[in-house]
């Protein structure tokens, strides 16, 4: 079931919160909806785009963490060794920063239009930052 719609650049993706696996992360992020920002291409993690959030402190615990998100899985890294960020994998990813490997909370999964994820990644890589919007469906 998709309860979110993510618009990134010219692409739209249905998505769902992973409330059973990351309840606190989902609860806190849901309060921010609609959430609008820009994505840029990752530096160290592979095939992903990210939203750098600097020193933002969501006060989110570690839950449902992974360093290897599948395409369409969205992570929130609550900060610590590196800055707070949201990461969206579109291909092979080993989540990392200049400090080394990281693990983020997998809290959203894209449920459709997965063929457009690599197109989004290449658009961001070659043409730069793209707007992204998370909203209820």
Image (spheres, rainbow, N blue to C red):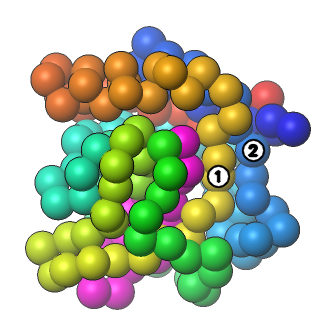
Rendered image quadrant of residue 86: bottom left
The image shows residue 94 at horizontal and vertical percentages of 32, 64
The residue sitting at 17% across, 60% down in the picture is 44
Q: Image height check: is 20 above or below 8?
A: below
The image shows residue 18 at horizontal and vertical percentages of 75, 59
The residue sitting at 18% across, 31% down in the picture is 125
Query: What residue sits right under mark 2 in the picture?
Result: 16
Asked whether the viewer can see residue 27, the reply is no
Please report whichever mark, 2 or 1, sits nearer to the chain's N-terminal start: 2
Please name whichever residue, 58 or 111, is drawn nearer the observer in this view of the structure: 111
Residue contact at pointers 2 and 1, CB within 8 angstroms: yes
Please name whichever residue, 55 or 117, is drawn nearer the observer in this view of the structure: 117
Based on the picture, tell me whether residue 69 belongs to the magenta stretch: no
The image shows residue 106 at horizontal and vertical percentages of 59, 64
Number of the label disc, if any, that sits on residue 121: none
The residue sitting at 41% across, 71% down in the picture is 67
Relative to 100, is 135 on the left or the right?
right
The image shows residue 49 at horizontal and vertical percentages of 33, 43
Relative to 20, is 55 on the left or the right?
left
Q: Image height check: is 23 above or below 112?
A: below
Residue neighbourhood size for the residue with mark 2, other residues' Cα within 10 Å, grouped as few (<14), some (14–19), many (≥20) = some
Locate the C terminus by quadrant: top right
Specify the segment rendered in magenta.
Answer: 72-86
Query: What residue sits right under mark 1 in the picture?
Result: 108
Rendered image quadrant of residue 7: top right
């Amino acid at each position: 079931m998709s309860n979110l719609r993510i618009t990134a650049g010219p692409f739209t993706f249905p998505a769902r919160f992973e409330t059973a696996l990351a309840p606190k992360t989902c609860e806190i992020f849901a309060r921010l909806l609609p959430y609008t920002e820009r994505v840029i291409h990752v530096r160290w993690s592979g095939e992903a785009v990210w939203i750098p959030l600097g020193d933002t402190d969501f006060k989110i615990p570690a839950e449902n963490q992974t360093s290897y998100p599948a395409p369409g899985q969205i992570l929130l890294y609550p900060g610590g060794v590196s800055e707070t960020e949201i990461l969206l994998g579109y291909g092979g990813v080993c989540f990392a920063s200049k400090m080394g490997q990281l693990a983020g909370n997998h809290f959203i999964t894209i449920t459709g239009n997965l063929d457009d994820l690599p197109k989004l990644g290449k658009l961001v890589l070659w043409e730069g930052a793209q707007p992204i919007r998370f909203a209820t469906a």
